[in-house]
Amino acid sequence: MLDSFDFPDPTQVMPVALGEPGDRLFLLQVVHDDVPVLFKVEKSQVAALCDYLGGILADLPPIDEADIPGDPEPPDPRTAITSWPIASLAVAYEEDTDRILVVAEPFDDVVDEADPDSEPPTARIRMTRAQVAGFIRTGRALVAAGRPPCPLCGLPTGPGRHACPRMN
């Protein structure tokens, strides 16, 4: 059975990309009580989450630039807890705490087959508005640093020859 996580006051929440464009692993890194926890995410999930969080921040009071955290250091796999891949994300604004709640869930196939009635694991991450702004800035930079799109088909060009379907 996979573990559930609750991060009521994480010190860091950032997307991280390891590797070279075209061969990168995207992770959601949450640091709580000085312990980093890593969740595998897709590049498209990072992009969509950044866009959605940006819309939420646009409706809230502005953030002081000095409060926005910088880019994270790459995670150290020797000290990090590596958890499950994220399948779905839900987002809510908690007005009473002025935090943005992100709830992540894994793919359905990780449910404990020995106990089909058990609850699937979740990760509940409560972020400050400044942490959200830092997440958006870092996430958008990571997504933009990928392989450039083909001008004809829009698919990413590779480090080698690009097999463009429109050139067929």
Image (cartoon, rainbow, N blue to C red):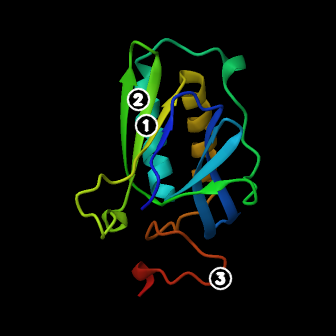
Regarding mark 3 in the picture, which secondary structure is present there? loop
Residue hosting label 1: 102
**Which numbered disc, 3 or 2, marks the residue that appears first in the sequence?**
2
**Which numbered disc, 2 or 1, marks the residue that appears first in the sequence?**
2
Quarter holding the N terminus is bottom left
Q: Residues within 10 Å of mark 1 (few under 14, many from 20)?
A: some
Among the 4 quarters of the image, the one containing residue 120:
bottom left
Say if mark 3 contacts mark 2, CB within 8 Å. Answer: no
**Which numbered disc, 3 or 1, marks the residue that appears first in the sequence?**
1
Q: Amino acid at mark 2?
A: Gly
The reply to whether residue 147 is in sight is no
The location of residue 163, given as percent across then percent down, is 50, 84
Residue hosting label 3: 160
Q: Nearer the viewer, residue 147 or 37?
A: 37
Q: CA distance from mark 3 to mark 1?
A: 38 Å
The location of residue 148, given as percent across then percent down, is 59, 63
Q: Residues within 10 Å of mark 3 (few under 14, many from 20)?
A: few
Q: Which of label 2 and label 1 is nearer to you?
A: 1
Q: Residue at x 46, y 56 (%)?
A: 44
Q: Amino acid at mark 3?
A: Gly
Q: Where residue 55 is drawn, which disc sits there?
A: 2
The location of residue 24, given as percent across then percent down, is 63, 66
Regarding mark 1 in the picture, which secondary structure is present there? strand
Q: Is residue 95 above or below residue 45?
A: above
